[in-house]
Amino acid sequence: MIVLMNVKFLSKSRGIKNLFLRFLSVPKRFGLTSKKFDKLLNKYSMLADRLGCVPTFAITAVTLKRHPELARELGRRGIEFAIHGYIHTDYGVLPLEEQVKHFKRAIHTFQECRLPFTGFRAPFLRTNGQTPQALSHLAFPYDSSHSVHWDVVDQAKYARDSWREYERLLAFYQTRKAGEYPVLPRTHDGFVEIPVSIPDDEAMIERLGITDGREISDVWVNILQRAYDRGELFTLQLHPERISLCETALANVIDKAAQYKPTVWVATLKEIAEWWKQRENFTLDIDASGNNVYQIHANCSERATVLLRHGRVNVATAPWFHGYETVMARDFILESPARPVIGVGPDSSPVAVKFLQSEGYAVEKSDQAENYGLFLSDLAEFQEADEKPLAEKLEKSGAPLLRYWRWPDQARSALSVTGDIDSITLIDFALRIWENSKYHGRF
């Protein structure tokens, strides 16, 4: 019965045909011992080292328990690890109590195996409304389970069946459209939510049937360009078992990122989460001195990017992007035709204010619109879907603005390389069915 339940669940994601093809491909990627997969991990880590990036691998605790030395060796090489659940199951169907039990047992396993972990990513990228509570309760620094999909593949190029399987995957992952929401980290209940980008390696290779490294490269470079243009985040997901088909694409993405000016910040998920939490504490003290002159003190780290548009300061600046200048000092005098903050109506939603502050702006509630170069009076019913239009409105505004940028060291956007490990041998793969029978919903 449990075997039939697992097949039914997997067919919901893959379809019967793709599920059958998946089973046929497994022996090509996994062996009875860890030797075959170890070679793939070595190829991945050596390529990443040559490219100057550090991947974050999410590994299931039961897999770690069977191969602790292999994981520790990767850790010694600098690879970062996250928890991928205790077993490879759909946590989106488990209640809070069972999720907490699974995640506690996973933490204990990582501690027993002496392998540090930095955060969490759910198997199948599937969670539910109670997962944030479970992660917050256990003090996970970040969750990288939510996905966004970028409109970078041309449906006309692929067979109808292939496109149907791709759409099936998007529905299974419950992805959101990157064009409709800012693809950025978010803070929830004390931890940082870091979105992962689709199409990933599985979506392209297993669903769309793309095996040409140049075509994979074109897709990922396109995502990188769009993320860069918007100042957003590209969390690239590449599973180790597909590194041979994707190594050229990964190299091209990292090489492309190095060419941008301003730069792309290439970081691990841990670094992104730590930065986002640190950035929450940045503030701007703005004291009016009269005659359109303001004394500014930026309470922030040296890595913070302070941006100015349509104003003059008494310290060094440098051209940046989209008409902004970077301000090099933390204390300076600003000459501006209007107060360089965003004024909002007294009835503005706290959600709207929080979003504006997360974008690095100084925000003041007021009923005196004439005191501000930019005043927003229509934020009472603000929702998450309104974030993108508001961000675009602010970018098009000619008002004087002072803000913190999203990324450190004057970087325009960010890139993170990640991958999941749920099996290392054929035995691991086969045990997943038994583990779901034993642990799914109970301990």
Image (cartoon, grey):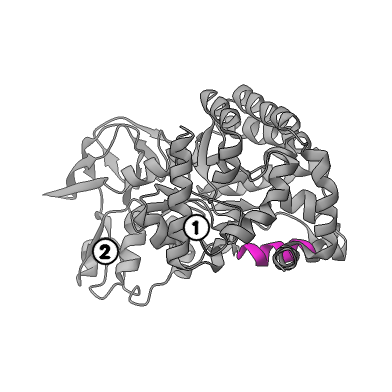
Q: Is residue 158 left or right of residue 104?
A: right
Look at the image and give the residue range highlighted in magenta.
165-174
Sort mark 2 into few (<14), some (14-19) or many (20+) by Cα contacts within 10 Å.
many
- The location of residue 83, given as percent across then percent down, is 51, 45
- The location of residue 225, given as percent across then percent down, is 62, 44
Q: Is residue 354 left or right of residue 331?
A: right
The reply to whether discs 2 and 1 touch (Cβ–Cβ < 8 Å) is no
Mark before the other along the chain sequence, 2 or 1: 1
State which quarter of the image contains the N terminus: bottom right
Q: Is residue 5 left or right of residue 343?
A: right
Name the residue tied to disc 1. Answer: 182
Q: Is residue 165 above or below residue 279?
A: below
Residue at point 67% right, 63% down? 170
Q: CA distance from mark 2 to mark 1?
A: 22 Å
Magenta region, main secondary structure:
helix
Name the residue tied to disc 2. Answer: 343
Amino acid type at image mark 2: Gly
Sort mark 1 into few (<14), some (14-19) or many (20+) by Cα contacts within 10 Å.
many
For the view shown, which residue lies furthest in the left direction?
289
Query: Magenta stretch containing residue 53, yes or no?
Result: no
Numbered mark located on residue 22 in the image = none
Residue at point 86% right, 65% down? 160
Q: Is residue 407 above or below residue 49?
A: below
Residue at point 78% right, 49% down? 205
Q: Is residue 170 above or below residue 33?
A: below
Q: Is residue 208 left or right of residue 393?
A: right
Amino acid type at image mark 1: Pro
* Quarter of the view holding residue 152: bottom right
- The location of residue 123, given as percent across then percent down, is 59, 54
- The location of residue 263, given as percent across then percent down, is 51, 34
* Quarter of the view holding residue 145: bottom right
